[in-house]
């Protein structure tokens, strides 16, 4: 597929259209497809036996629950899935009762619901998926009028039960680990470094070391490590393209890989130092360092692969021990300290179950609620892309809702659904999504027409649903157009089961018509309602996020010194939050582009994750207020953060030397962690440049 993408680019087509031809079949997940198909097909089969209409609502809920599953560890997936099940059931009942109200009441309430569902993306990828699907549930609920309270409760309960069944299947019975290939690839990079470390240690034990031996070591071991790191980088990028970068797992994996790359650079520098000069004391110190480091790298690799790496005391002690070894050989001090710092980076990355993204690990429920409210309030600003997108979706949906509710048809709800689901925060991405949706729907309509001739009974339709669901969910990570091509016949057959006697050809034709109209209206809406243009934004958003977080850190230090008011700190935190959200939105859009931008994208992912962790440490300073000891040292760090951020914003790797830490200050550790994240970001940006 690469030649096609290259030719399209050369022909002058917009880069955003290239995802249509850049299909990566290595990301097919058959296990996810079979699991999602089973969750839906089991309920459809049960309905064939019981013939109870609310069961089709349960089947739809199971399908949507599988779609909103963000993947990753149990603790991260459970809230999203359970939240969708509960909110979906309440929405089904509430909006079903709302349908009987006058049109001037229904349309504003539904538009408010769409606004809230679309604004939920401010809380990350999982919330965005839940919000998108709740938008669909809201519109579908309006298409059904409940004659009495028992019927309403039956449909709401069926939705909740179907979602609960899908949650049980995905979380307990059949768990899929989407980040496992990326974790294995990163673990392989650490194992390759362990092999390099062992080979370098063995080389030091040779009495007669000549240039050829050092060349052989560099040629074989360094090449193996570099290849392992690049394979890991490809695996991580492929995974976050499918799952999204705004998650704890994605950030954790990106920073681990960056730590591995930077530790590899330190090991290369160490080998060059040892090859350049023969010094008995330095060789002995290096041998002790390598002897200590090799098993640690193996331990890290095993922990990453098994998902068991936490804040291991052994890693903390080893980092201190490696740094202390340099005291016996001053020429090794810089290398040893670099290796120790990268070990601390890995040690500080707790398993995802114990890491709250962008917040201190010890955050309480009250603090989490306060952080959530603060983040939402910070994005009620016209500069927030999420706010503009949510408002645009609500405004554009209003006339579509008014028309389809005033003159209802069997499939008129598809117009509003396609309009809102096609619409994206940016013009270019909306255009791409519209083309993908229309092309996939037309192809899926042809498949549905073919199946219509073969599946003439409810049982045969139920049987055909299973392979269609397998294909749809298996191909979802590879291409949105392919996903739509498989999802369309699935929806058509489900609709036919819900409305016996309807022609599949009519259903497919109506779906294609509404998809085309809705997608066209979505493109028109983003062109007319506060359009946002994408090209060249990633670098600017990255610089803005770096400077905003530095301003937040400076304001917080000023507050500790009693020189800055709380209101200014809140403004700085708000600015950092908006900048991070805008950067993450830009990353989502960039993930749709071809892999040719992999170096810059990988660096941006690393910086985004580092900034989030940096923000968490700054927040910890505010949540644990204490009088600043040694004010001069704190002022020195405030100046250093400003200077380092300016260098980072320029893409430079040579940050100023760290100033001295405040003496006997329990908060000084936060400064070290902030500096560590900035230094990790500097190396990542320099490599991309």
Image (cartoon, rainbow, N blue to C red):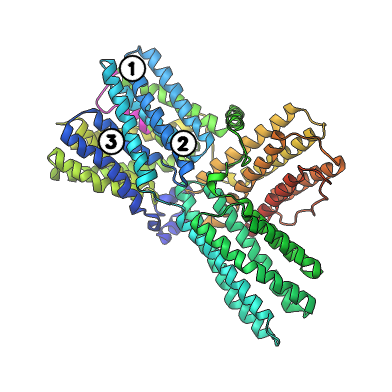
Q: Which mark, by number, is residue 79?
A: 2
Q: Quadrant of residue 462?
A: top left
How many marks are shown on the rendered structure? 3
User: Do the residues bearing badges 1 and 2 touch, measured as CB atoms within 8 Å?
Assistant: no
Q: Is residue 214 above or below residue 599?
A: below
Q: From the image, tell me which residue sits under label 3.
A: 59
* Whether residue 496 is visible: yes
The residue mark sitting in front, 3 or 2, is: 2
Instruction: In the rendered structure, find residue 494 and report the number of the disc placed on it.
Output: none
Residue 8 in the magenta stretch? The answer is no
Q: Give the CA distance from mark 1 to mark 2.
A: 27 Å
Q: Earlier in the sequence, mark 3 or mark 2?
A: 3
Q: Secondary structure at mark 1?
A: helix
Q: Residue furthest bottom?
A: 208
Task: Judge whether residue 534 can be spotted in this image.
Answer: no
Q: Residue at x 49, y 40 (%)?
A: 125
Q: Which label sits on residue 97?
A: 1
Give left or right: position of 196 versus 426: right
Q: Nearer the viewer, residue 6 or 230?
A: 230
Q: Nearer the viewer, mark 1 or mark 2?
A: 2
Q: CA distance from mark 3 to mark 2?
A: 21 Å
Residue 399, percent across and down?
A: 39, 22
Q: Nearer the viewer, residue 674 or 323?
A: 323
Left or right relative to 320: residue 45: left
Magenta-highlighted residues: 407-418
- Image coords of residue 105 (percent x, y): 40, 13
Which comes before the other along the chain, label 1 or label 2? 2
User: Residue sitting at 66 percent across and 71 percent down?
Assistant: 291
């Amino acid at each position: 597929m690469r030649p096609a993408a290259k030719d399209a680019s050369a022909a002058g087509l917009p880069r955003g259209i290239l995802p249509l031809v850049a299909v990566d079949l290595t990301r097919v997940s058959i296990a996810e497809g079979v699991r999602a198909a089973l969750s839906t097909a089991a309920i459809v089969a049960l309905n064939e036996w019981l013939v109870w209409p609310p069961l089709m609502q349960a089947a739809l809920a199971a399908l949507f629950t599988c779609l909103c599953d963000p993947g990753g560890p149990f603790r991260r997936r459970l809230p999203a899935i359970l939240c969708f099940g509960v909110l979906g059931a309440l929405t089904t009942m509430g909006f079903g009762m709302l349908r009987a109200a006058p049109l001037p009441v229904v349309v504003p309430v539904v538009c408010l619901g769409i606004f809230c569902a679309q604004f939920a993306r401010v809380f990350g990828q999982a919330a965005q998926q839940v919000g998108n699907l709740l938008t669909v549930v809201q519109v579908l609920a309006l298409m059904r009028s409940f004659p009495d309270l028992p019927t309403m409760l039956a449909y709401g309960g069926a939705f909740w039960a179907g979602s609960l069944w899908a949650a049980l299947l995905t979380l307990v019975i059949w768990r899929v680990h989407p980040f496992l290939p990326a974790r294995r690839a990163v673990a392989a990079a650490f194992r390759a470094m362990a092999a390099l470390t062992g080979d370098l240690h063995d080389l030091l034990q040779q009495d007669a070391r000549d240039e050829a031996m050092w060349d052989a070591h560099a040629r074989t071991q360094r090449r193996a490590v570099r290849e392992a790191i690049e394979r890991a980088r490809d695996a991580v990028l492929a995974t976050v393209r499918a799952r999204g970068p705004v998650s704890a797992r994605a950030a954790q994996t990106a920073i681990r890989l960056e730590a591995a790359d930077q530790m590899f650079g330190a090991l290369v520098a160490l080998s060059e130092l040892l090859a350049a000069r023969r010094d008995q004391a330095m060789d002995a110190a290096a041998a002790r360092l390598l002897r200590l480091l090799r098993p640690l790298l193996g331990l890290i690799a095993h922990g990453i692969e098994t998902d068991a790496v936490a804040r291991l005391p052994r890693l903390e002690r080893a980092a201190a021990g490696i740094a202390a070894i340099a005291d016996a050989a001053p020429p090794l001090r810089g290398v040893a300290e670099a290796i120790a710092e990268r070990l601390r980076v890995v040690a500080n990355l707790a398993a995802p179950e114990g890491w709250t993204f962008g917040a201190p690990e010890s955050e309480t429920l009250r603090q989490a609620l306060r952080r959530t409210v603060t983040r939402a309030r910070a994005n009620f600003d016209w500069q927030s892309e999420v706010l503009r997108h949510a408002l645009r979706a609500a405004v554009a949906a209003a006339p579509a809702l008014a028309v389809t509710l005033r003159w209802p048809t069997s499939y008129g709800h598809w117009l509003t659904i396609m309009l809102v689901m096609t619409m994206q925060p940016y013009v270019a991405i909306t255009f791409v999504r519209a083309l993908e949706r229309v092309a996939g729907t037309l192809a899926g309509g042809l498949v549905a027409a073919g199946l219509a001739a073969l599946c003439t009974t409810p049982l045969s339709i139920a049987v055909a649903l299973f392979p269609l669901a397998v294909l749809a969910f298996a191909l979802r990570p590879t291409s949105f157009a392919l996903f739509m091509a498989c999802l369309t016949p699935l929806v058509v057959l489900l609709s036919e089961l819900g409305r016996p006697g309807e022609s599949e050809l009519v259903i497919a034709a109506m779906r294609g018509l509404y998809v085309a109209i809705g997608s066209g209206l979505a493109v028109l809406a983003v062109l007319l309602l506060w359009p946002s243009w994408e090209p060249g934004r990633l670098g600017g958003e990255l610089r803005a996020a770096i400077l905003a977080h530095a301003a937040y850190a400076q304001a917080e230090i000023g507050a500790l010194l009693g020189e800055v008011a709380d209101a200014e700190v809140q403004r700085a935190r708000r600015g950092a939050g908006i900048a991070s959200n805008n950067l993450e939105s830009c990353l989502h859009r960039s993930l749709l582009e071809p892999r040719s931008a992999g170096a810059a994208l990988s660096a941006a992912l690393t910086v985004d994750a580092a900034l989030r962790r940096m923000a968490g440490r700054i927040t910890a300073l505010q949540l644990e207020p204490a009088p600043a000891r040694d004010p001069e040292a704190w002022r020195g760090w405030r100046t250093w953060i400003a200077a380092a951020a300016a260098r980072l914003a320029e893409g430079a790797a040579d940050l100023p030397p760290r100033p001295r830490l405040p003496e006997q200050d329990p908060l000084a550790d936060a400064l070290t962690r902030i500096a560590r994240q900035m230094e990790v970001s500097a190396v990542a940006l320099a490599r991309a440049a």
